[in-house]
Amino acid sequence: MSLALYRKYRPQKFSEVSGQQHIRVTIEHEIEKNQIAHAYLFSGPRGTGKTTMARLLAKALNCEKRKEGTSEPCQKCESCEEIAKNASLDVQEIDAASHTGVDNIRENIIHSARLSPSKRKYKVYIIDEVHMLSISAFNALLKTLEEPPSHVVFVLATTEIHKVPQTIVSRCQRFDFRKVGAEDLVARLKQMVKSEKRHVDDSVLSLIVRRSDGSFRDAESMLGQILSLETDPITLDQAKLVIPFSDIEKVLDFISCIKDRNLTKAIDSINDLVSDGVDLERFLDECIEAFRHILLITMQQDRAQSLPAMIESSAERVRTLSEGFSLERIVFCIETLVSAKEGFFQYPVMQLPLEIAAVKMCAGKKNESEENPPDSHRAETERKKSSLPSEGREIGPAEKDRTKESGSNNILHISFETIKEHWGTVLDRVKEYNHALFSFLCVNKPLSVTANKLQIGVIYDFHRQRINEMKNKLAIEQILQDILGAEMFIECVSIKNENLPGHLQKDDVDAESIAQEFGGSVVD
């Protein structure tokens, strides 16, 4: 069985390590000066070389022929060969994800560390994903980590440093690994392709680099998939057969629909993506990245010179798209897409989060500068007409009362008392629309009215989520407008149960109390 590329080409000496120069130089210097620490903590994203660096450290410390004042292992002695084959008795790699308990730590590390190395100078314990250890296991490890025998070196590796207790972190020499830059990744992939005596288009390597998100291992794994193709050279069209793919032009087409507020076309494009088998989560990520660069271009024009490989080929189109967006709307679109990504796996239909995001982005954050002059004039005419109490339109009962009281032709805001007076009618209309939504509004209550915004206090987060669903929110606002004769918007505000009036608290809710409070009636 052939080795995976990331194993076949794993660096065997420090000079072969790329992308982590700041760490490599420091560790090499410590080895050369024979000033090694007793415990190291390597943290950073997956696939950035933490375990590789740990093995190189172990190899250099136990190399039998390493020259004084140098750091590179000889690669030829028995110790170097054993470590390269992962067969050394004095270098133990422990996966903390499968050895989380305190008993495993005592047996595999604490008791074993007291014994002298079987052959070599040092016993090296490499604990991968150390954040997975239990609190008891960390406590058991702490004493040995603080005062280890002189022949023991610990290397702890983690992708989630925030989960490692501070007592452990403070006893280690910490190194933070970074995501690998695109240039380093491309150079490494080209070297592998050359060693494999194959030919791969640069566009394919750029695609791999973009998908790997700064991870050597991910990039090398994808290259292995590509090289499984029998064709030579391997082109981008052929690479699409084995790598989940979304075309930057499709991303920009979608953004163009959002820019033009063409919801129908945006939804159709999402359905086309599903039919083509495009990875929607990846597509969403690329939409966020494209919007980010549109934002940078909009803020500062010279940022356009530093576009990533993903959109270099469409740089001019990206710049053109940036001219049609305001900063406020770009930020709104990014926030909407990020929210969609966070809830990506909570929906039974995989494209639904992206479709909801499209609805929000096409409907929301419309600036005055985006309106056509005729539309602006028409809107102003309608606004002036709406200020008249009884000419040119039918008004609701609430507005008739307010007009009589004020005797003014100006637009008046609806009072909270008016809301309470007509709330029963609102509930009746909501019930006709959706019984579940009606029950949520019955349990919760209006809090206040500011301008044309009605705040509704909700006790349960589940109720707030359901009321805030786009279709439900729009339905309630339309019902309010129909009954009150004025445009109203709702905002849900989370409140504690004890902040409700006594007769509305959850341990004492009854329909009669709610009906009396808001002028409604109980219906069987």
Image: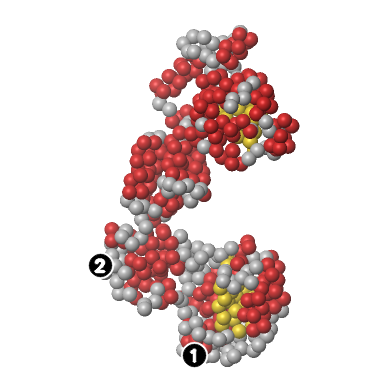
Farthest front residue in view: 524
Tag 2: residue type? Thr
Residue at 30 percent across and 66 percent down: it is 200
Residue at 68 percent across and 33 percent down: it is 509
Mark 2 and mark 1: Cα distance apart in space: 40 Å
**Residue 423 visible in image:** no
Circle 2: element type: loop
On the rendered structure, is 221 left or right of 171? left
Tag 1: residue type? Cys
On the rendered structure, is 204 left or right of 496? left
Circle 1: element type: loop
**Residue 517 visible in image:** yes
In this view, the mark in front (2 or 1): 2
The structure's colour scheme is secondary structure
The quadrant of the image that shows the C terminus is: top right
Q: What label does residue 77 carry, if any?
A: 1
Residue at 52 percent across and 11 percent down: it is 388
Number of numbered discs visible in the structure rendering: 2
Q: Relative to 277, does residue 142 appear above or below in the rendering?
A: below
Give the crowd class for mark 2: few <14, some 14-19, many >=20 residues within 10 Å.
few
Q: State which tag comes first along the sequence, 2 or 1.
A: 1
Residue position for label 2: 231
Q: Relative to 77, does residue 223 appear above or below in the rendering?
A: above
The x and y percentages for residue 359 are 44, 37
The x and y percentages for residue 219 are 41, 65
Give the crowd class for mark 1: few <14, some 14-19, many >=20 residues within 10 Å.
some
Q: Quadrant of residue 25?
A: bottom right
The quadrant of the image that shows the N terminus is: bottom left
